[in-house]
Amino acid sequence: TPGTPPTPTETTVTDKYAFAFDIDGVLIRGGRPIPEAIEAMKMLNGENQYGIKVPYIFVTNGGGKTEQERCLQLSQQLEMEVSPGQFICGHTPMREMAEKFKTVLVVGGEGEKCRHVAEGYGFKDVVTPGDIIKDNQDTTPFRKLTDEEYKNSRLRNFGEVEIEAIFVFADSRDWASDQQIILDLLMSKNGRLGTRSEKFDEGPPVFFSHNDVVWSASHDLTRIGMGALRVSLEAMFKAVTGRDLETTAFGKPQIGTFEFATRLLQQWRKDTHDIDSPPDTVYFVGDTPESDIRGTNEFDKHAENSWYSILVHTGVFEEGTKPKYKPRATVDTVLDAVKHGIKLEY
Ligand code: G3P
Ligand code: MG
């Protein structure tokens, strides 16, 4: 019918290769798009000399909101549609832990957001630091809840609650009080606040959604991230108890995250482009050698297809220094990375 926009046919989409993108320091910095990012996305959406569309996904260590909310935000920033079907954030794989633990402490993020994310993942009983301070305000001598925090926090008697696991979902907004509460739980008998274990070996396990010590925000220089909180917590536990603390991190560079990304990409290519076979090559574009490049290179050794790491200069990695993990290619911006991958294909 006249006036109907042409629908893309399968021949305009490549099944041979795909892209995966890190977000902070590659596409976004401090809530604003990196200028070349918009053109890079257009290129993958078919605005290239071959008129071909290239499937892609996003794999960020960031989080703090539901996947839907993050995608909506990214859609606005990049001026195109981003679907949760092509998006993984640091805490996405934590959903697989919801059956294992009943009562959990969720740390980090703004207001009640991370509680809602955790409940959306199916966690049955989610406690926040605010709930604990509301029950006993002496918990944190230098932090008083704001009126809003007090209103939103849930009142319960923590003398009767056993917290089975601690999940750091997003960056802590108050390191001192969050660490005090985590430390209290780690030193407790079976996660019961107000108790002290004799050997400090009965506390709940701690999980972090990623391990980036620094990340790329709006400041010119890198900012400390969740990995820094992890280091700090482990050192503090040692200083206070004399024991070593073992914690677990999800996100990149963990192989599990790349396996998750593989399944996501497979489903995404099937659902949107009707492609059944895996791509020969996945180009992974990142700014952090320790998580993006390390993870891609290590996964490349395990995977049946090729995972090709590309490092950009717009984020954590500083030009002129030697990256700790060597990328297959180094380029200036995400647009150069997309051009580089496409060029290798033809
Ligand atoms: O807090 C987020 C940051 O550590 C990394 O995000 O997108 O660079 O993986 P991203
Ligand atoms: Mg990054």
Image (spheres, rainbow, N blue to C red):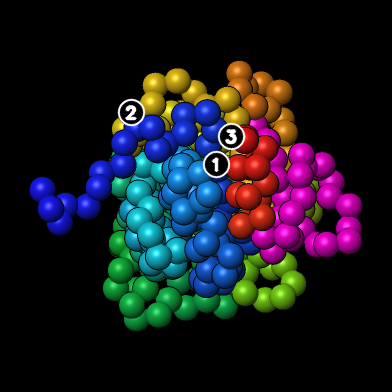
Cα distance, mark 1 to mark 2? Answer: 17 Å
Q: x, y (%) of residue 263? A: 45, 28
Q: x, y (%) of residue 16? A: 52, 28
Q: On screen, 49 above or below 271?
A: below
**Crowd rating for badge 3 (residues with CA inside 10 Å; few <14, some 14–19, many 20+):** many
Q: Residue at x 62, y 74 (%)?
A: 218
Q: Secondary structure at mark 3?
A: strand
Please report contact status of discs 3 and 2: CB closer than 8 Å, yes or no: no
Tell whether position 309 is magenta: yes
Q: x, y (%) of residue 324? A: 84, 46
Q: Residue at x 76, y 39 (%)?
A: 328
Highlighted magenta segment, given as a residue range: 307-333
Front one among 36 and 23: 36
Q: On screen, 177 above or below 273?
A: below
Which amino acid lies under the numbered mark 3 shown in the image of this protein?
Val
Which residue in the protein does label 2 denote? 274
Labels 3 and 2: the sequence-earlier one: 2
Which residue in the protein does label 3 denote? 282
Labels 1 and 3: the sequence-earlier one: 1
Which amino acid lies under the numbered mark 2 shown in the image of this protein?
Asp
Q: Residue at x 54, y 33 (%)?
A: 17
